[in-house]
């Protein structure tokens, strides 16, 4: 069988010849999926900024910081923190986003198992891993300035047009365009172009009080000066803005929550646009020239390897792009812990250890609003009292003067949502409600730390707004975003420089960058969500707001129907169009539980594609959603002793899909990987070794094999 590598070289040479006799080879027409036609700029692209990085003072992967600079606890500084330049913000964004995704400690694997200094073959080098090349950035928009999705393509100097390759690295979470940089590393090391999209989200807000907005490079200006060039504008008229600020001063609007676009429905489209942008850029650089100086589409889906990849929401976007790819722009898929929305009735079943899991395949807003109700109370369960951060959480986390979670337990009992009469009993009951709703028992140890970091309320509020296409004026369920004092009262953001740098430090889902989640309906007046008082005068962590969000998912009124219609726009089909694909997911994931995401999606894909399916599912034991938390041993001791980095397995999945596409090597079969926790003392676990993270098995042992049937049943071994 002729390998794709050989075919690529042959086809590239053929197209170069065709350029000299263009008319005989089909002229200049054709769509973006064909070769031999004129290279046409996609109509949705705005002005393209092109920047060359020499790999010494600055580079594509580390922004000039190198492997050691990324590992440093000291972030890169600004000359003027109140007015950072675009170049300074880029450097800080790469630094912060890289560290937000990965365990950056040497003991956890940085610099030995992964990182810029570890080459494409997995060898540890003495270099800094800087990658010279050129970066291209542009908006994708319909001309209105309301979409302005940021797309970026990085082309390393090592790119070989005779063997072209590209991966996607769509931003995870609600981050900006550099949010997928740790995934992009795999491609840059191998000489592949990397196509990024912020998928219509982003870290920097519209400051409504001062009417300033972010631009594409993260710098800020007035909304009037930015016009259609704003990365995000809340789109209020002057009268609406004045009324809003008078009623609710010092608030911020964030793009994911308040764009009114329901961005998630288009995550696949915008990821495909990033790929198209990549093809355009590569052919502008390397395409053969006609006698009239026009570039030909020399690099095409027929000769390039293109892998859709990323993690979390970015991984879900990669899957959505593959499903939408009618032109064959994408060759394969390799994703980690993807957020995927299943059809309302997917027709699949999930078993673990021979036992059926009753609740599976629910959309993110469904299980997240369930977590938002019960996770804080569940974190007080005596059965999880030794889990990371549990003791601090029970004592009153984040500097609170008194424990807040018992008030949530009592409020749930008062509403009839729990039946136990003691806090301990209510906490164990809450934990069991989460288990019954699809969380694995391995997730139990994660609830306290996720509750302390306000993960569930942050995600629930953002997605509820987005899916409902709510305006910031709506204050959906009484929530808003603002700075807050230590006592919880709304205040202007402190320090002012925090806003100037939020493009680089924020995650697009407050709490982040000093912006807090606010309960506008608190008894004491607008206050930070977890410090807000109920009408009864009790601290119950805004149970009313949590119930309101849950009612949007389960209810039938107009507000609920609006959100539910938004959810329906985000549901995926399960059809990967026969592309070779690997999904890796940590069994313990408490943010995106495997029984709501990767397990049922794998079963759906098999039911939809049948024998044509080329999807392998890899479930990693002792892995969870936030690798970066493992690297916080003084803050979250116990993550280091319990969990291994899932990032290792994303890299291995990319290796396997690339090898399959390049040489025809079979993908590893669906399997559970039995990793080995580092153990030791929480906060000072011994250094990880290769023995802790065994390789993927081409053919797993019987006790590790995952079975998937054409009827849509998936069976996971215990």
Image (cartoon, rainbow, N blue to C red):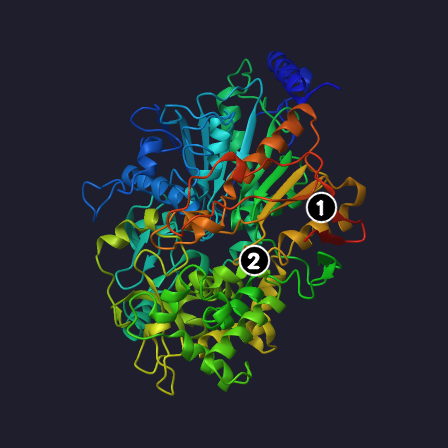
Q: Which residue sits furthest left? A: 80
- Residue at x 67% of width, y 53% of height: 718
The answer to whether residue 313 is visible is yes
543 vs 571, left or right, is left
Residue 285 in percent (x, y) is at 48, 22
Residue 23 versus residue 94: which sits nearer the camera? 94
Helix, strand or loop at label 2? It is: helix
Residue 442 disc label? 2
Q: Which quadrant of the view contains residue 542?
A: bottom left
369 vs 88, left or right, is right
Which quadrant is home to the N terminus?
top right
- Residue at x 66% of width, y 16% of height: 6
Residue 625 in percent (x, y) is at 50, 51
Residue 438 disc label? none
Q: Which quadrant of the view contains residue 11?
A: top right
Q: Which residue sits furthest front? A: 680
The answer to whether residue 39 is visible is no
717 vs 510, left or right, is right
- Residue at x 40% of width, y 55% of height: 508
Residue 703 disc label? 1
């Amino acid at each position: 069988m002729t390998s794709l590598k050989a075919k690529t070289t042959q086809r590239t040479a053929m197209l170069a010849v065709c350029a000299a006799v263009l008319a005989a080879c089909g002229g200049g027409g054709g769509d973006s999926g064909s070769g031999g036609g004129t290279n046409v700029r996609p109509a949705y692209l705005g002005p393209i900024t092109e920047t060359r990085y020499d790999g010494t003072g600055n580079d594509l992967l580390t922004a000039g910081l190198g492997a050691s600079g990324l590992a440093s606890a000291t972030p890169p500084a600004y000359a003027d923190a109140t007015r950072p330049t675009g170049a300074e913000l880029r450097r800080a964004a790469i630094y912060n986003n890289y560290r937000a995704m990965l365990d950056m400690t040497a003991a956890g694997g940085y610099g030995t198992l992964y990182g810029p200094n570890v080459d494409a073959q997995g060898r540890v080098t003495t270099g800094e891993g800087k990658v010279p090349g050129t970066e291209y950035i542009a908006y994708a928009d319909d001309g209105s300035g309301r979409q302005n999705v940021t797309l970026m393509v990085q082309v390393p100097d090592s790119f070989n047009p005779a063997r072209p390759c590209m991966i996607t690295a769509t931003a995870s979470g609600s981050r900006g365009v550099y949010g997928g940089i740790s995934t992009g590393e795999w491609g840059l090391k191998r000489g592949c172009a990397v196509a990024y999209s912020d998928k219509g989200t982003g870290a920097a807000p519209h400051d409504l009080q001062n009417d300033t907005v972010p631009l594409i490079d993260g710098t800020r200006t007035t909304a009037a000066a930015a016009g259609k060039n704003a990365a995000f504008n809340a789109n209020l008229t002057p009268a609406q803005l004045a009324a809003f600020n008078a009623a609710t001063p010092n608030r911020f609007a964030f793009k994911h929550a308040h764009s009114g676009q329901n961005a998630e429905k288009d995550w696949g489209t915008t990821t495909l646009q990033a790929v198209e942008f990549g093809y355009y850029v590569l052919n502008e650089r390397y395409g053969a020239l006609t006698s009239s100086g026009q570039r030909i589409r020399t690099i095409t889906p027929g000769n390039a390897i293109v892998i859709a990849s990323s993690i979390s929401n970015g991984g879900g976007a990669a899957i959505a792009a593959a499903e939408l790819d009618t032109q064959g722009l994408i060759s394969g898929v390799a994703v980690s812990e993807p957020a995927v929305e299943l059809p309302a009735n997917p027709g699949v079943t999930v078993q673990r250890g021979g036992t059926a899991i009753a609740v599976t395949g629910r959309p993110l807003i469904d299980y997240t609003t369930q977590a938002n109700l019960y996770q804080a109370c569940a974190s007080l369960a005596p059965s999880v009292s030794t889990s990371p951060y549990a003791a601090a959480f029970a004592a009153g986390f984040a500097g609170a003067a008194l424990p807040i979670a018992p008030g949530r337990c009592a409020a749930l009992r008062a509403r009839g949502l729990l039946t136990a009469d003691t806090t301990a009993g209510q906490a164990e009951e809450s934990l069991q409600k989460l288990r019954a709703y699809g969380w694995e028992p391995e997730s139990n140890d994660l609830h306290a730390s996720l509750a302390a970091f306000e993960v569930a309320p942050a995600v629930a509020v953002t997605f509820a707004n987005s899916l409902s296409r709510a305006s910031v004026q709506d204050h959906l369920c009484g929530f808003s975003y603002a700075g807050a004092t230590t006592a919880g009262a709304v205040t202007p953001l402190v320090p002012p420089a925090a806003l100037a740098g939020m493009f680089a430090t924020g995650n697009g889902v407050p709490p982040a960058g000093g912006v807090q989640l606010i309960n506008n309906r608190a008894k004491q007046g607008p206050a930070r969500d977890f410090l807000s008082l109920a009408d009864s005068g009790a601290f119950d962590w805004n149970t009313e707001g949590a119930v309101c969000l849950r009612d949007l998912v389960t209810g039938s009124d107009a507000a609920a129907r609006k959100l539910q219609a938004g959810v329906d726009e985000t549901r995926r089909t399960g059809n990967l169009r026969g592309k070779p694909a690997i999904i890796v997911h940590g069994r313990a994931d408490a943010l995106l539980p495997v029984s709501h995401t990767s397990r049922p999606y794998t079963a759906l894909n098999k039911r939809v594609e049948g024998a044509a399916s080329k999807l392998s599912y890899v479930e990693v034991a002792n892995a969870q959603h936030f690798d970066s938390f493992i690297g916080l041993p003084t803050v979250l001791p116990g993550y280091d002793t319990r969990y291994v980095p899932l990032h290792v397995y994303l890299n291995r999945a990319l290796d396997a899909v690339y090898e399959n596409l390049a040489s025809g090597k079979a993908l590893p079969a669906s399997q559970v990987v039995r990793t080995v926790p580092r153990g030791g003392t929480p906060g000072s676990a011994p250094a990880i070794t290769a023995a802790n993270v065994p390789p993927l098995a081409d053919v797993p042992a019987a006790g590790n094999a995952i079975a998937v049937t054409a009827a849509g049943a998936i069976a996971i071994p215990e």
